[in-house]
Amino acid sequence: MLAGRDDVIDYPAVIKKYLWLVQKDQNCVLSPDSDGLLCGLFVSHYLNWKIRGFYDGKIMVLEKGFNPKDCIFLDMEVFRKGVRSVGQHMVMFNKDRLPTNWKNFDDCVSINNIRGHDGYHDFRLKYPFGTIHFLIGVLGTKQKIDIPKSAIAPLLFTDGTWMNLLGYTENSLSWLKYLRADEEGTPLNEVFLNKHYSLHELMLTMNDFLRERDAISIPRERGDRVTITLRGGEGTPHNLVIEEENFYLLNEDAKKRAERFLRLLSRLTGWKYEEKSWSWNRWQLSQFTKGDFVGAKIRLSNRTFDEFIAKNPLSFAMTSTQNIEYTLEGPDKML
């Protein structure tokens, strides 16, 4: 655990262990939802990172000439030594009996792991916010991060943060303290303890943001994500067009919708969207196998978790006390 006094995060210790979190001019791969897109805007704006592709648990698209070890995966935990990643999902099942290959997460910054929360003892206490909030907290200890009033809506929208604050209030307050969001002058204080809105004003502001998101949406594709496979599908590539030399690009309509949402986020946050920092073509495509414990009729336990980890999953997340959603390599490998 990297906590300081009274169970609060020790940001300098996190940065010391994972110095690449605050280093400039890195390459990254994003989850293709609003949290991943906010993370991409944030690191490209403040650290000049370049977005080289996306990974949604079924497929990965990565710009030609780059290897996963060249990149930092944002908003996901990659279970591979040497592959850097940052995520907010519950991945540790029982901290009292870690698998022998748990060092696969040595290069992964997982906020639940940092606090020492596992699914067996602490599932109800899991992190209730987005990866973007953790990144803001980390970088906010190194440089000034501006959070304008207009940024509150997208930052509370992502990953259901707004609903978690109201639905899981006690746990949310615990995490706000842990993240030091209750400390005056921090960027997370501006996000969560802002004095800009009454509750009713915030409701109206959130509604306005949702209506702008809906205006970008089309059937089966919400406007707040880059859709590269369809939900509920088998991982068949979607919105991807093959170009020369068997590389892929995002089709023009999907790219326009993605950029429209990114420009909306950019306008509200002040984090500039620059197309030159984002890869939309010349993608190498890798397909993987997605599964879950409930679908496979596996009861989650110490034994079944150990058996699962022995399969060397690529990434996974505990989504309930009885379910893990996971990705296995095959037909392609990540490395």
Image: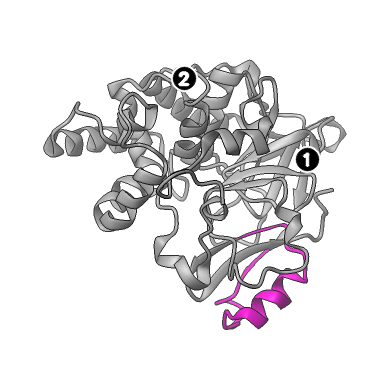
Stretch of the chain drawn in magenta: 290-316
View extreme (right): residue: 245
202 sits to left or right of 53? left
Report x, y in % for residue 227. 56, 44
* Relative height, residue 208 to residue 270 (above, below): below
149 sits to left or right of 68? left
Looking at the image, is mark 2 or mark 1 earlier in the sequence? 1
175 sits to left or right of 20? left
Residue 275 belongs to the span the image colors magenta: no
* Relative height, residue 262 to residue 89 (above, below): above
Residue drawn at (54%, 19%) of the image: 46
Which of the 4 image quarters holds residue 14?
top right
Report x, y in % for residue 291. 64, 68
Report x, y in % for residue 71. 73, 35
Packing grade of label 1 (10 A; few <14, some 14-19, many >=20) is some
> Mark 1 highlights which residue?
68
Q: Is residue 211 visible?
A: yes
User: Disc number at residue 271?
Assistant: 2
Residue drawn at (47%, 73%) of the image: 321
